[in-house]
Every structure is written in structure tokens, then in C-alpha cells.
Amino acid sequence: MEKTWKSFSIADSFGSFLPAPCTLGSDEARDKKYRWYGRDRSGSAGVVVFQYSLSGEGRIAISEKEHRVCAGSGFLCRIYDPRIVYYYPEEAKEPWQFVYLVFKNAMDWVDSLNRDAGYVFKLQPDCQYLRRTSVLLDQPGANIKISAAEGLELVSQLFSDICRARDLGVEVSRSRLLAEKAAARMRDRVESSD
């Protein structure tokens, strides 16, 4: 897997308070040294990550409680959180391939999902969010210029697809339903202000 990294530039200053992507990338972990400690990432306060496993397996530990992140699932968390570490497990036999999205201005949504539904979520492999990130990663260059509305749509699509995962038998929590409604309200607000 080729390592890819893209940064986002929001083309307009409107909506600086809206959820917006910062970086999007694909990567592969083969080394047991791949380990990110939330306590060491204070420079990333205010941003979150969704890291989705394409193949292999990773782990996320929250307050030392470990969760598997297998192919078809991803974790969602604050980047700067002293309780969190995510890593390539010692016993892994195959590379962990993943895509990730780092975004800002969605702390309340993420905190609610984490509190009420956990940190690891399954997505359908053909969901809109994954299709959209695939297209974005295939774009030439290292910078993606998007509008505030397009940034909000990408982040909202992630939340919507996490919520839709309940159709695959994933437990539905009240916060997932609230997140889907909040995303729809945010889209409506942006559309009505045009």
C-alpha cells in the first residue's frame, strides 16, 4: 500500500466554526513501534481522528482497556486524550492497512459517541464516506481545496455512515441517532444560508 497524505484548504472563511477536515491519508503499519499516545499529542488539542482498517488489525486502548480494530471497522477519538493509545499489536502477523481522517470542530459529537457508543465502529465497505475518501486520496497533489460546505459534508457523511451501520446489526445508541440528526441540521443550516 502506498502511503498517501493530503491536507485540506478551506476555500472560504465562512463556516470556520463548522466541522471541517484537516488531513486525510492512507498508511500501513508493519512495525511494532507504530504506537501513538494521546498524552504526547497536546499540539493536537481540539482535533479528532477516525482511522478505518482496510486489512490487518490494529488496537486502541482507552484507560488500558484494549479494543481490536479489525478490517471493516475504525476508531473515532480525540487525538489529544491522555487515556488513549492506538498501535500495531505485538502478535500481528500481517500489515495493518488503514485510511484516516483528522478533523476539527466536532468535539461534542465525538465525545457523545464515545461516551454512549464506544470508540470502535463498523462501516459498510461501499459506504458513501469511504467512496468519497477514496476519490479524494486519488486526486493529484498534496493539498485539496474545498469549500466549508464540502468539508462539512465529508465529516457529516462519516457520522451518517457510522449511524447507518446499525442496519448491519450494530447496536444503535441514542447518541448515534442524535449525531445523525445533528448532521442533517448542520447541512440544512449551510444550505439555507446560501
Image: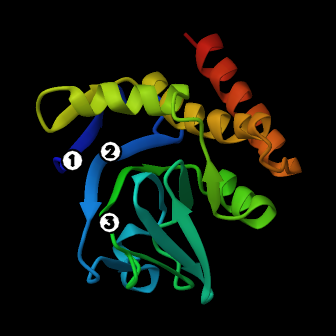
Q: CA distance from mark 3 to mark 1?
A: 22 Å
**Residue 65 rendering spot, x and y as whole percentages:** 64, 85
Q: Given contact means CB atoms under 8 Å apart, are the residues at marks 1 and 2 in contact?
A: yes
Crowdedness near tag 3: few (<14), some (14–19) or many (≥20) residues, C-alpha within 10 Å: few
Q: Given contact means CB atoms under 8 Å apart, are the residues at marks 3 and 2 in contact?
A: no
What amino acid type is highlighted by mark number 1?
Answer: Trp
What amino acid type is highlighted by mark number 2?
Answer: Leu
Q: CA distance from mark 1 to mark 2?
A: 6 Å
Q: Is residue 11 left or right of residue 179?
A: left
Q: Is residue 172 left or right of residue 61?
A: right
Q: 58 or 149, which lies in front?
A: 58
Q: Which mark is residue 94?
A: 3
The residue depicted at 84 percent of the width and 47 percent of the height is 172
The residue depicted at 52 percent of the width and 28 percent of the height is 126
Q: Which quarter of the figure has residue 18?
A: top right
Crowdedness near tag 1: few (<14), some (14–19) or many (≥20) residues, C-alpha within 10 Å: some
**Residue 140 rendering spot, x and y as whole percentages:** 13, 27
The residue depicted at 21 percent of the width and 47 percent of the height is 5
Q: Earlier in the sequence, mark 1 or mark 2?
A: 1
Residue denoted by label 1? 5
Element type at mark 3: loop
Q: Which mark is residue 34?
A: none
Q: CA distance from mark 3 to mark 2?
A: 23 Å
The residue depicted at 46 percent of the width and 33 percent of the height is 130
Q: Which quarter of the figure has residue 176?
A: top right
Crowdedness near tag 2: few (<14), some (14–19) or many (≥20) residues, C-alpha within 10 Å: many
